Image (tube, helix red, strand yellow):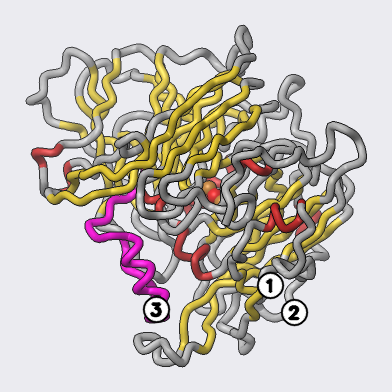
Amino acid sequence: CRIRHYSFDVVMKNTTRLCSSKPIVTVNGQFPGPTLYAREDDTVLVRVVNHVKYNVSIHWHGIRQLRTGWADGPAYITQCPIQPGQNYVYNFTITGQRGTLLWHAHILWLRVTVHGAIVILPKRGVPYPFPAPHKEVVVVLGEWWKSDTEAVINQAMKSGVAPNVSDAHTINGHPGTVANCSSQGGFTLPVQGGKTYMLRLINAALNEELFFKIAGHQLTVVEVDATYVKPFKTDTVLIAPGQTTNVLVNADQNTGKYLVAASPFMDAPVAVDNMTATATLHYSGTLSTTPTTTTTPPPQNATAVANKFANSLRSLNSKKYPANVPLTIDHSLFFTVGLGVNPCPTCKAGNGSRVVASINNVTFVMPKISLLQAHFFNIKGVFTTDFPGNPPQTFNYSGPGPANLGTMNGTKAYRLPYNATVQLVLQDTGIIAPENHPIHLHGFNFFVVGRGIGNYNSKTDPNNFNLNDPVERNTVGVPSGGWTAIRFQADNPGVWFLHCHLEVHTTWGLKMAFLVDNGKGPNESLLPPPKDLPKC
Ligand code: C2O
């Protein structure tokens, strides 16, 4: 294993999309940002220098950060932000992970343009558990906003109503042919007939789960969130913000051009950018005048397609890559996730109320210094450890809106002893309306042992849990009006964020933190903070 050094300069860059230009926040002037390459067991040092007017922090989404919570990145959770003109070196070792992940800004809405791929290759000499592809290609899905996203969300928070939506989706930074700015074209994936390609798909969009499809080609899913799965064929991949999916594409058509499409799933009664982003798979030797074979993406709210995809995911669970699902549970938790309404006398547009989001009726309030610092240095008054393990009232979560819309504000964590095993059922409440929530847990992978529509039934549903080969991941969709059950072992000391990866829901408060106590052994406790840890 080796040490890999990266320099991330956060700089403004004038960028043109949809026929108009605006300055955007980038890493090294690139959109999407640079790909970070490493091998399993490597140590990575990324020096982030902030040259912009915003506070910045970078999260290495899905990296376990064993004992190195200081390098995790969410602002005010594990670090104070890097202020303008300041810098910070993220220093972490990649232990027992290989595959595709992503890095992204974890403050404000900067993630919209400050993101990129993390490619972790297996240890030298260790093959993939599937035939080696001829080539690997990173495909980052995202959004493009004509307006300034910081202004959009600031305005929405003042008025109390939902923010605007993006103007286009993107594939490797480009909307493609849909944009009515055809001179800008889109991303091209060059292939040779008869060869197999691995696409490392990443959804870096702020607010939308996406379907991904290639005309005339089947996709073989081999990995999600940097864990191997039992390979299966599909024509459509569903991928939520924060999720990654590796697929093999066999270039078995030998000639021609084929449309690649990324379109919104939605499954929620909120407004979304409904544009389909396009790219082109292009067989070498095929003339540019050849017409492109098109494809129809699934329609919005194609729940059956989404469910089929989610239900097809299984851990590889081989000898070499076993699924170590916790079979006994120390902490059995039930979290309701959803939107709500709070009084807001100053909100004019919201008619005296504003949209909030909560977990177990707690709307998370960001602290002024990071929870991890408060925990490590024993600073009182920053957060409390009384986050409820169950909702305050039982009601019909997925039925018509119940009466208890109210949420309480708080900066609350749930305390877990080191190595405790946890079962967490996430139930969408549908208080305003049922909605999909891709929930991300920092610091851990978890196993998705169950999933269903309607209300979770604690008596009967566990009988159907998959404890043998459930998919292992770091971000999972809680279906609209339904539930998802996950299990993990709290083997990583520190403070770990759990939140909806739809940025608008995070902003509204759909977030909480787990505080995992130090273990007793020398390899179990949180390391001390690095000297250059930013100050608030
Ligand atoms: Cu990718 Cu806390 O997020």
Say whether residue 509 is left or right of residue 257. right
User: How many marks are shown on the rendered structure?
Assistant: 3
Ranked by sequence position, the earlier of labels 1 and 3 is 3
- The kind of residue tagged 2 is Pro
- Checking the image for residue 396, the label placed there is none
Instruction: Please give the residue where the numbered disc 1 appears in the rendered image.
Output: 360
Q: Which residues are magenta?
A: 140-165
Indicate left or right for 501 with 417 as reference.
Answer: left
On the rendered structure, is 226 left or right of 486? left
Residue 425's spot in the image, x, y percent?
A: 72, 60
Q: Quadrant of residue 525?
A: top right
Say which amino acid is labelled 3: Lys
Front residue of 300/308: it is: 300
Residue 42 pos. (x, y %): 62, 21
* Residue 463 appears in the figure: yes
Given residues 33 and 137, the one toward you in this image is 33
Q: Residues within 10 Å of mark 1 (few under 14, many from 20)?
A: many
Mark 2 and mark 3: Cα distance apart in space: 28 Å
